[in-house]
Amino acid sequence: MVMPSIDDTKIVTIERHILNEQRTYPEATGVLTYLLYDIALAGKVIASQTTRAGLAEILGRTGNINVQGEEVMKLDELADRMIFNLNNHTNRLAVMASEEQEDILRIPEQYGTGKYVLLYDPLDGSSNIDFNVSIGTIFAIYNRKTESGLGTLEDCLQKGKDMVAAGYMIYGASTMLVYTSGRGVHGFTLDPSVGEFLLTHPNIRIPEIPRYFSANQAYMKYWSEGVRRFTRYLQGVEKDDAPPKSLSLRYIGSMVADFHRNLLAGGIFYYPADSKDPRYPNGKLRLIYEGAPLSFIAQQAGGYGSDGYRNLLDIQPESLHQRVPMFIGNIELVEKAEEYIRKFD
Ligand code: P6P
């Protein structure tokens, strides 16, 4: 039987890709490679469940409410548990923190601790599960700041500019893992037939000409004057300030999916401060496991992430679930948002 010839030099797994990268860094120990592998393994398991959500008993709600005051979907819990359990015994991490858990996640005492810190949103956009909309996992990796022993809250509250690596998994038509370790952004697509993430999008760069803008314009009445005028600029109706010709609106309401499309096609995702809920004047999205990792990825792909005033990666987090306005995507569009906010707020 003649088998189709497979060019095995083109089969690049996450491990091979990172090891190739690490060869340029003699001091690299390989621990980060294994950590990314553990995260990828969690992604494979989560993907195996998200594609069955409509079939398995895990669809639907647990009746639990998480620290965000949001109803917890069963897949949320599975994803949260999966990432913690696949990483809590590897001696690679000092501490973890999750969007689903109020406090930091300590490494169980029977296991050793390591030099990295893992912050993650296990299943962002999970309210979309019932409607079969793409959802995702977001993660950020830092070096621990404390010397040894169990990691602390201080280890989790670091500026995004000190991040070692960041990435996301998107569970959609295919499952992808996109990551950066500070040397460009690279995308891997899961081949379910072999259970491996294979390099499909090396060196992702956000296109110069943006194609989309993504925001929930139903909330325009809650936004500041500057953000409203920026949105009118994007719509092409702000007097004497024409936007890029190609712009179209795309908003899925699942940040990883909105971000991923804009990373590949060019555009901006924004979730500004709003007066919708006086408890959350800085909007809905969180800094340490959403805004900061996605800004690091955008910046590594030639884009930029801002809170409307400054680089999101320069913000010193004050608390685990701190919310922050965010404008992430093409530099020109994010800087235009900052300009409107400076001028009209
Ligand atoms: P809104 C999903 O619930 C999420 O956390 C993000 O994935 C998404 O970008 C945002 O909230 C959507 O929020 O207020 O537009 O429904």
Image: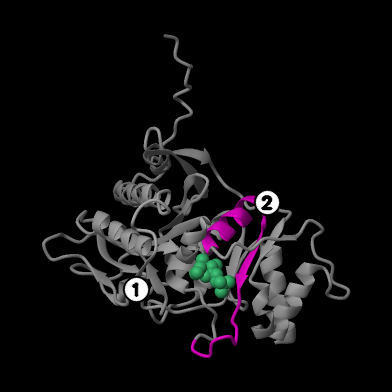
Residue for badge 2: 207
Kind of element beneath mark 1: strand
Judge the density around disc 2: few (<14), some (14-19), many (≥20) Cα neighbours within 10 Å. some
Query: Of residues 202 and 249, which is closer to you in this image?
Result: 249
Q: Nearer the viewer, mark 2 or mark 1?
A: 1
Q: Which residue appears at 33% of the width and 51% of the height? A: 42
**Does residue 274 show up magenta in the picture?**
yes
View extreme (top): residue: 1
* Residue 322 point in image, percent of width and height: 44, 79
Q: Is residue 291 visible?
A: no
Judge the density around disc 1: few (<14), some (14-19), many (≥20) Cα neighbours within 10 Å. few
Residue span colored magenta: 255-279
Precedes in sequence: disc 2 or disc 1: 1
Q: In which quarter of the image is the C terminus?
A: bottom right
* Residue 149 point in image, percent of width and height: 18, 68
Query: What amino acid is labelled 2 in the image?
Result: Pro
Q: In which quarter of the image is the N terminus?
A: top left
Left or right: residue 35 compared with residue 335: left
**How far apart, in angstroms, are the residues tagged by discs 2 and 1?**
42 Å
Q: Can residue 218 be seen in this view?
A: yes
Q: What number is the disc on residue 63?
A: 1
* Residue 6 point in image, percent of width and height: 47, 21
* Residue 153 point in image, percent of width and height: 30, 76
Query: Of residues 155 and 57, which is closer to you in this image?
Result: 57
Query: Of residues 162 and 15, which is closer to you in this image?
Result: 15
Q: Which residue appears at 70% of the width and 59% of the height? A: 212
Q: Which residue appears at 55% of the width and 57% of the height? A: 257
Q: Which residue appears at 58% of the width and 67% of the height? A: 305
